[in-house]
Image (cartoon, rainbow, N blue to C red):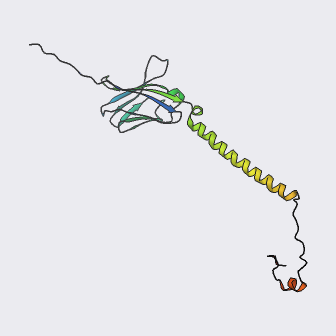
Amino acid sequence: MTLCRQLLQPLPDQSTLELEAEQHLRMDFYISDPVIITFRSPGNSSSMQLCTVDGRVKQCHPDYQDRLRIVDNTFMLMDVLLSDSGIYTVKEKEGVTVRISNVTIKDVHHSWKWKEGYCTGFGHGSWAVGIGALIVGVLLGKFIPSPVSRRRESPHSHQEDKENGILLNGIKR
């Protein structure tokens, strides 16, 4: 009788992420075992080890120490830069790949955030133009004489009506 033995290995989770500069990259480990996180920039054939995580203990590359956070089983790279674009890989210490993320960082000027800022600036500019037009209108109204008809004295008014303050046609004299 022949024994057959198979080793099943799950395929790693693969994702493509697109972030804006200054956002935070978040990657779940999916496991609680010790892991190694590596990074490979576009056009580079070798990977750089960013961090090793064993429970709550992490050892990170000195260039990334200030921006890396590990919360539960999640790797977070804070305030990503354009140079952070590349392939991030999470592996078990035995070498089994758990996750691969292809990350692209976009410049803020090409993002909606910049376009929204442009629209907000446009809104503020509209207010400035409106207030300027109002000021010009008030100044023109003050210094340019307008044809206003004066009310003539009524031939039916009497001197005693004027002295007693009786209203004639809605006007108090």
Farthest left residue in view: 1
Between residues 69 and 143, which one lies in front from this camera angle? 143
**Dividing the picture into quarters, in which one does residue 144 lie?**
bottom right
Residue 43: % across, % down: 49, 17
Between residues 117 and 22, which one lies in front from this camera angle? 117
* Left or right relative to 26: residue 20: right
Between residues 111 and 67, which one lies in front from this camera angle? 111
> Is 77 situated above or below 49?
below
* Left or right relative to 166: residue 101: left
Farthest front residue in view: 156
**Dividing the picture into quarters, in which one does residue 82 lie?**
top right
> Is 47 situated above or below 70?
above
For the N terminus, give its image quadrant. top left
Residue 146: % across, % down: 87, 59
> Is 155 situated above or below 68?
below
Which residue: 46% across, 27% down? 103
